[in-house]
Amino acid sequence: MNKKLIALLLAALTAIALFTACASASATDGQPKEEEPTEATPAAETRDDLIIAIESEPPTLHPFDHKAVTAGYMNALTYNCLFKLDLDTLEPIPDLCESWEQLTDSLWRFTIKSGVKFHDGTTMTSDDVLASMEYARTFTTTADYTSFWTAINKIDDRTIEIDTGTPYALTLNNLSSIKIVPKALIDEENDFNRNPIGSGPYRFTDYVLGDKIEFEAFEDYFDSENAAKIRKLIWRVIPEGSSRTIALEAGEIDMIIEPDANDISRMEENDAITVLKQGGTRVNFLTVNTEKAPFDDINVRKAINAAIDKQAVIEVAMGGEGEIALSQTPMVFEGASDKDCDAFDMDLAKQYMARSAHSGETISFSCYVFNDSARRAAEVIQASLLELNMEMSIESLDYATYLTQVFAGDYEMAVSGYTSGTMYNFLYGIFHSDSINAANMARYNDPEIDRLIELGRTQTNDAERGETFTQLTDYINARTIYIPLYQGTVIRAHSAALQGFRVSAAGGMRFEEVYWNEN
């Protein structure tokens, strides 16, 4: 190659290099260039879990073997009944039941919905309904809602008949308490505490004792229009009230079932938290074991009742949330009465003690509590009773032990409470002799009380039944069987981003309705 050609080639290469350099420079100096591809920003994910804090561990997950409110919360997730109570009215509405009719004054026919699946994949039939009703009846704790029928019969795979023997006005209400489980599992003696199989909107998945209980949405839930919107529910056991509040404020949990009364005003001022309040049917009592002295003495019970400043109990225990209870029954129900009820009056209390068989004695006893608010209430009561020469010690128990001891009658005094959707169930639950060793914690046995309860349940006329229950309330008020403290307010606190949450006056909830606000 001659020198002239080499020179031309070098010049051409130089020109190309200069052009490339200029092009590169122009691109970095604001001239258009092809941008390198970048990763797309991921869209915000919708939460698919809900973390709920409770103060006390449920004693069981069994559908029938308890009278525990916390266990009832779990049961509502995993089981269905033929009927359920409307959250707003507390009236029974269909659940598993497709149709029903009252054939005579005492004979009812019910048809269940088609294709209902249990969590184990089997399909519900009338055999499961009959077996569940008979199974429920084997537990003392269910007597208030399983004693109403004299016969039950299968008509076909989806139809049953129930004979109440005599007219019974609360058939549908009671059927809203009987959970339906697979007959095959009953026959196999399944442990429904460890393996709670039902047809509910959520199925049980895990339980870490003392820590958490987990459920997930049931994909084959029969009521597709009301299927669970949040996939996973996690219940955390946090006994200390302020710890629950701090966890909610920090976003570690999403809901508190029992907000600490001392923290409610603080949470109400927090825009990130919604505090929901609902007038309740629950009456909170100081319960005494009437089988044991000195509480078998009516004058001692009346003295204790008159000695307690119930407004002070409400202020200290509940932060002012609640109303003084004078009557033995909830004032929200037809048949309630405050006749023969004593208000706070220390002089009257001392007069009652002077009439008692224990006048002039120093009386010592213990009082069981299971949570913070009950302990605070007990401390107010403890100070009041000193004026009657009563020395009350306070003993804190875990919830399961508390229930076992109190229901068995192995106690002297306890701070307790009871709630129900109807006056009949309330009366039967805590006053009928059949409920001794269950919710009749006072262990009071009176044939006249049993007679009036049983009369009321046969009266289909609302006015007549109301009169009977008023007569009964007056009767038990005069005997001061329990020491009523206050009628509570149902309170829940949750993240303001949670939508669709409701609670009834009896504390019922529908977690399948709630969802997260995506905005």
Image: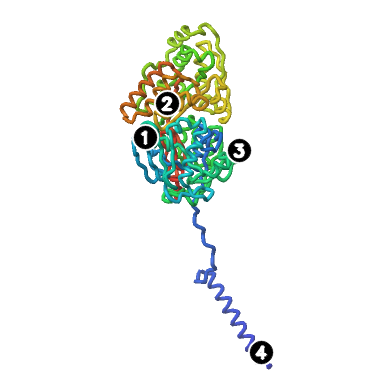
Q: Position of residue 439 (x, y in %)?
A: 49, 27
Which residue does the numbered mark 1 point to in the structure image? 106
- Report the mark closest to the observer, 4 or 2: 2
Q: Can residue 481 be seen from the camera position used here?
A: yes
- Does residue 268 appear in the picture of this structure? no
Mark 4 or mark 1: which comes first in sequence?
4
**In this view of the protein, which residue sits in the foreground, 28 or 467?**
467
Image location (x, y in percent) of residue 172: 39, 37
Amino acid carrying mark 1 in the image: Ser
* Mark positioned earlier in the residue sequence (3 or 1): 1
Question: Which of the labelled discs sits on residue 6, or is there none?
Answer: 4
**Disc 3/disc 1 C-alpha distance (Å):** 45 Å
Count of numbered circles on the image: 4
- Depth check, front residue: 264 or 377: 377
Q: Residues within 10 Å of mark 1 (few under 14, many from 20)?
A: some
Image point (55%, 33%), residue name: 56
**For mark 2, what is the residue?**
427
